Image (cartoon, coloured by chain):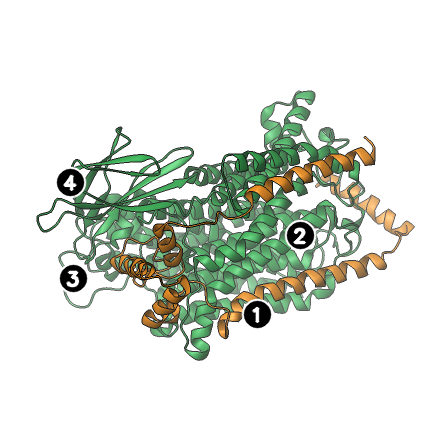
Chain colours: A green, B orange
Amino acid sequence: MNAALGTAGVTLGLAASVLGAVTLGEGLRRRDPRFLRAGRRYVWLLLAGAVLATVAMQSALVGHDFSLRYVADNNSRQTPLLFTIAGMWSALEGSILLWALVLAGYLAVMVRHFRARAADPLVAWATLVSLVVAAFFFALMAGPADPFRLVEGRPPLDGTGPNPLLQNHPLVAFHPPMLYLGYVGFTVPFAFALASLVTGRMGEGWLVETRRWALFAWGFLTAGIVLGGWWSYEVLGWGGYWAWDPVENASLLPWLTATAYLHSVVVQERRGMLRVWNLSLLVATFSLTILGTFLTRSGVLDSVHAFSESAVGPALLGFFAVVLAASIGLIAWRGDLLRSPGAIDAPVSREGAFLANNVAFGAFAFVVLLGTVFPLVVEAVNGDRLSVGGPYFQRMTLPIGLTLLFLMAVAPALPWRRAGGEVLHRRLLWPAWAGVAAVVVAVVTGVRGPGPLLGFGLGTFAAGTALRSLGLAVAAARRDGTGLWRALAGRSSGGMVVHLGVILVAVAFAAGSGDGERRQLRLQPGQSAFVQGHRFTYLGVAAQQLPNRRATVARVRVDGGKVYEPALSQFPFATQAIGTPSVRAGLFEDVYLTLVAVPSGGSGEVVIGVTVAPLVTWIWLGGGVVVVGTALAAWPRGRARRGRAGTGTGADDDESAGAPPAQSEPPFPALVGGEHPPGGKAGP
Amino acid sequence: MSATRRRATWGAMLVVLAVALAVGGREPSGPRSVEEQVHAVASRVRCPTCRGLSAAVSDAPAAEAIRDEVGRRLGEGQSEEEIVDYLVASYGTDIVLAPDPVGAGLLVWVLPVVVGTSVVAGIGIVLARRRGRRVRPTEEDRDLVARARAGGESG
């Protein structure tokens, strides 16, 4: 029953996406608006198919329908409800279903949002591109990654349950959906980028409309990555949150290119420059989400030769190649229309800083991509096996990260076009002194090494610049009597809040939060030991029987106060015991306890792993601040302000938060050449 | 404020920064504890049974075995390099987390530097050329701007 419903949903989704794309293609060929309006309606069928398949999957999981192979492999009668529901994204096939569901949701919002312009070839092309992407994912489910495949023979009485690591912490219910809302969200801006190339309408119109979509996707992706780090910290038990694992890198890559895009798109809006570059960044971001899925889902990481064992790997790699080839071809074909009309007047200017920002983010992404795929390429070429891990990424990305912090400190204070010494002095002096003061204080308190010192100094400098911008916005709002909310909502202030969040994360990195002081303590009951001035007293072990596992809990008193209980759990069908850390989180320092070995062979000795790491909490706080800032930045401008005319208060500062773009200076270069009138030429 | 006074202010700031970095910028040297040395070596190699984690941070038995072996060899007076060489000989080249800059391993270090430098140089050349042939706006251009601005305000 569930299998039949699910397969029906998948088939409906596949048919709707193919038929919709064909209808739209036919409408574009005939220039017939009736076809275009009909074509977009298939998106609702697509959504219905995706929802039907999801309902069938959830009904199978919750009802423990082990006649489905996916359920038998990823669920058991003992699995708690939360992890039963989350079982949908515990393995490949269900993850593809989640991807398809999120994509169908985005598509539905997109066609509804643009419903008044359904007959516009630009919108039609964008819908067509998204439908082709949807068709690919539904085809994966109809073929090699079928979530509704039945078990052979008689269904088992019980399943094996999800991977133990995926039923150990509630965050598993939130991290993957967040991540997918981020990944998949970039489909919409990507589709509009391709549509603008195909129709030849390179004006800034589509860009402004999809910028907010990219911002939303970016916010979800950021939240997904931070939650992933948090999950890793709370579950994996090694005291860190980021291991430069290929799976983690795969989520970081589109984040880097999307962050570059969100910055350089401002230059295009203001000055009309960097068009090819912005299109390339959108294409890169979307392609990297596909490449990341290929890397993490094809088994290629275990061995280059494993990836073709299922057809999923080659399919994803092929789709990645098609996306890349089509996009590059289109960009080359439209190259003449993309030539930017403006020029950068001076390197020390806002646009110069944005350019530098993009070079730095590009370099960051290049290093991460190279390091991630390099072992695969080398193994494929000459069979050598080598690893590229943490030490490589840390060494290569540290200078890039510091450069980005410096740009973050200086760029928001730079005026467009050209900066004079007087202006820079006035805007940067106090933030810069704050940064220097932070370095001095750090040295006095015993911090050593160029990395941490520069990280603290530049982080404080950047925070000073961001706070100054926010302060100016608040002061301007007070002067105008518009209230705090209007000062903080909108792109400029939201962006500065995002900067503050990123600075919190960067300072935590610089402080070495990912690599704390680590010890293994061998303790008898009642015995104490010290690590970094903290006292750990081992009280004893206790056994716990939970619905889905058997746990041994060690009771450890920290600093004579609260008792913490790191555990080792034995899951049915799992050979290895799974550790559950116990963390005393603090604003400046985390104490992280793991149970490494339980007493055995008559001795009462346990092995307790202790990690003392600074500022870990700042990572999670920073992630929260980034999400708040993103929401502020995405807040529709019209609702946050009285209107476009009334806010040009920043006479000395085009940086003042309220200033609508291009009011304080002639928008001359942005508008000459290349801009086609709205509703201009139709498709090729 | 005059340009001279501005320069003096920033100069003073740079001096303070330079002194602070000179005092605190060097990594702490001197004799390290055995634990720190074990951590340093184990950080450079992979935990054989995990994915992505170094042998320094993993609680897996295989990682613990490597840490014990490193501690034993340090006690025998072997240098960090000798111990890493031993680990490569017994576990294979992919035990090291950052490849040696030789052969194929050289590429992963050099490529980002080469590509990065060429991109920066390329952008510099393009920008310099563009600045060289900037044209003055004509009357017609200004007209276009005025019209576009008038149209743009409504949207």
Q: Kindly report the distance in space between the C-alpha atoms of the residues bearing marks 3 and 4.
A: 39 Å
Of mark 1 and mark 3, the one earlier in the sequence is: 3
Label 1: which secondary element: helix
Q: Are marks 4 and 1 in contact (CB under 8 Å)?
A: no
Of mark 3 and mark 2, the one earlier in the sequence is: 3
Q: Would you name the residue on which mark 3 appears?
A: A155
Tell me the quarter of the picture where residue A125 sits. bottom right
Can residue B152 be seen from the camera position used here?
A: yes
Q: Amino acid at mark 2?
A: Ala
Locate the N terminus of chain A and report the quarter of the image it occupies: bottom left
Q: Would you name the residue on which mark 2 appears?
A: A356
Q: Amino acid at mark 3?
A: Pro
Of mark 1 and mark 2, the one earlier in the sequence is: 1
Q: Nearer the viewer, mark 1 or mark 2?
A: 2
Label 3: which secondary element: loop
Q: Chain of mark 2?
A: A
| Disc 2 and disc 4 on one polypeptide chain | yes
Q: Amino acid at mark 4?
A: Val
**Vertical side of A407 occupied by B13: above or below:** above
